[in-house]
Image (spheres, grey):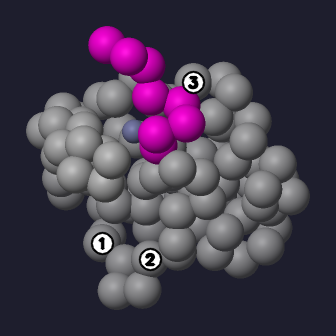
Amino acid sequence: MVSARNAKRRARRRGADHGCVNTAAVDELLRRAHGRCTYCGDFAQHIDHVHPLNSGGLHCVSNLTPACAACNLSKGTKILDDPPAPLIDCGSYASAA
Ligand SMILES: [Zn+2]
Ligand SMILES: [Zn+2]
């Protein structure tokens, strides 16, 4: 079972979009973060790509975290030295396609 799961994970990694970023996933992200910015604890108004899309990050729930507007904008396309751990796992939300 483990090898099958790894193969699936590898296949997913090839695509930049897994279909996992949907309303349910974003709601769950915000719920787990208590509606707060991951970086500073202020109210989250944005969903930030931890590893920026234009720096090779995935559009994937495991790469998303709630952020306030100030942190999201100031972070920009920087790649963090110490990124926050994923709040939710992609596998639960990815579409079969
Ligand atoms: Zn913030
Ligand atoms: Zn994903």
- Quadrant containing ligand 2 reads top left
Quadrant of the image containing the C terminus: top left
Label 2 sits on what residue type?
Pro
Q: Are marks 1 and 3 in contact (CB under 8 Å)?
A: no
Residue positioned 86% across, 58% down in the render: 34
Q: Earlier in the sequence, mark 2 or mark 3?
A: 3
Type of residue at label 1? Answer: Ile
Q: Which residue is mark 3?
A: 22
Return the residue at label 1: 79
Q: Mark 2–mark 3 contact, CB under 8 Å?
A: no
Q: Is mark 1 within 8 Å of ligand 1?
A: no
Tag 1 secondary structure: loop
Query: Percent from the top left, x then y, of residue 75?
Result: 45, 67
Residue found at the very far top of the displayed protein = 97
Residue at the image position 44 percent from the left and 28 percent from the top: 94
Q: Tag 3: residue type? A: Asn
> How far across and how far down the image is residue 23, in percent?
66, 24
